[in-house]
Image: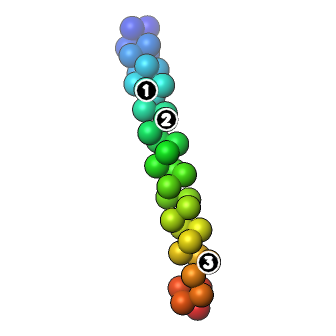
């Protein structure tokens, strides 16, 4: 149970960073896809 609580705390602490990275990656990929040169 203690190990599970430790794992949960780790996930809880890193969640914000993970979401931030996903948002940045999504914006970057969206800009790439909307670039006419890359679209071809």
Q: Residues within 10 Å of mark 2 (few under 14, many from 20)?
A: few
Q: Is tag 3's residue or tag 1's residue first in the polypeptide sequence?
A: 1
Residue depicted at x 44% and y 39%: 17
Q: Is tag 2's residue or tag 3's residue first in the polypeptide sequence?
A: 2
Q: Quadrant of residue 35?
A: bottom right
Comparing 19 with 10, the one in front is 19
Secondary element at image label 2: helix
Q: Is residue 36 above or below residue 22?
A: below
Which circle marks residue 13 in the picture?
Answer: 1
Q: Residues within 10 Å of mark 3 (few under 14, many from 20)?
A: few
C-alpha distance separating marks 2 and 1: 7 Å
Residue depicted at x 43% and y 15%: 4
The residue identified by callout 3 is: 34
Quarter holding the C terminus is: bottom right
Residue found at the far top of this picture:
1
The residue identified by callout 2 is: 16
Q: Position of residue 6 (x, y in %)?
A: 39, 16
Q: Is residue 19 above or below residue 5?
A: below
Q: Position of residue 15 (x, y in %)?
A: 49, 33
Q: Position of residue 26 (x, y in %)?
A: 56, 59
Q: Is residue 3 above or below residue 17?
A: above
**Residue 4 relative to residue 36: left or right:** left
Q: Quadrant of residue 30?
A: bottom right
Whether tag 2 and tag 1 are in contact, CB under 8 A, the answer is yes
Residue depicted at x 49% and y 45%: 20
C-alpha distance separating marks 3 and 1: 34 Å
Quarter holding the N terminus is: top left
């Amino acid at each position: 149970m203690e190990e599970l609580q430790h794992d949960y705390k780790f996930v809880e602490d890193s969640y914000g960073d993970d979401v931030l990275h996903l948002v940045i990656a999504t914006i970057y990929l969206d800009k790439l896809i909307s670039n006419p040169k890359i679209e071809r």
